[in-house]
Image: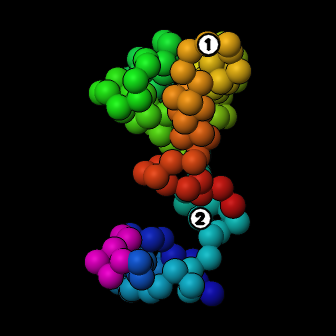
Amino acid sequence: RAEATVVRVHSDDFPNLYFTVRVAGSDGERQTVASRLRRCAVAPAGRDGDDGDLREGTGRMILDELVLPYLSGPSPGGGDGPADFRGEVAAECANVVISQCGLASVGLGSVRYDIFRVLSALEGRCVADGGDRSAALRRLALALGCGGTAPPSTAA
């Protein structure tokens, strides 16, 4: 086994993905398939492995710009309008924050706190009397990973 870094993911033969990798200590690149790759248990030498600030900043931006404006208020009725579509997209963006950016920060004003607040409000709309429960339930499901466009979590 040799330590390598994935340089590019090729999808031109989808669903058969293949990867360009750069082997540590080598200047050349090679192509391989996913079955020949394994995730490192520790960060590679020379990297601190801490991209937490980048993930936190990206999660905060997605949350502030795409999630909170569309999921903080009450669900609109109807089911097919632009506001409903925006709400579903915002719910999928919440899933991206949860699954890809992570919820490492803690405390009031953190990404974790704001995501929890949004999900709790959606849950409350699902169990409340009156209103459109189906829209809230759909958004809650999308935010928790039952979506069509959000990538699956990369947690090991």
Q: Is residue 91 left or right of residue 119?
A: left
Mark sitting on residue 139 = none
Q: Is residue 141 magenta?
A: no
For label 1, the SS is loop
Residue 150 seen by the camera: yes
Q: Position of residue 66 (x, y in %)?
A: 39, 27
Mark sitting on residue 44 = 2
What's the distance in space between the residues labelled 2 and 1, CA to CA?
54 Å
Q: What amino acid does circle 1 point to? A: Gly
Q: Which residues are magenta?
A: 8-14
Instruction: Give the crowd class for mark 2: few <14, some 14-19, many >=20 residues within 10 Å.
Output: few
Answer with the quarter of the image where residue 6 lies. Answer: bottom left
Instruction: Mark 2 or mark 1: name the one nearer the start of the chain.
Output: 2
Q: Position of residue 139 (x, y in %)?
A: 53, 33
Answer with the quarter of the image where residue 35 lies. Answer: bottom right
Q: Position of residue 54 (x, y in %)?
A: 48, 38
Question: To which residue does mark 1 refer?
Answer: 130
Instruction: Give the crowd class for mark 1: few <14, some 14-19, many >=20 residues within 10 Å.
Output: few
Q: Position of residue 89 (x, y in %)?
A: 40, 36
At 47% from the left and 39% from the top, the residue drawn is 92
Vertical relation: 41 (above or below) 66: below
Q: What amino acid does circle 2 point to? A: Pro
For label 2, the SS is loop
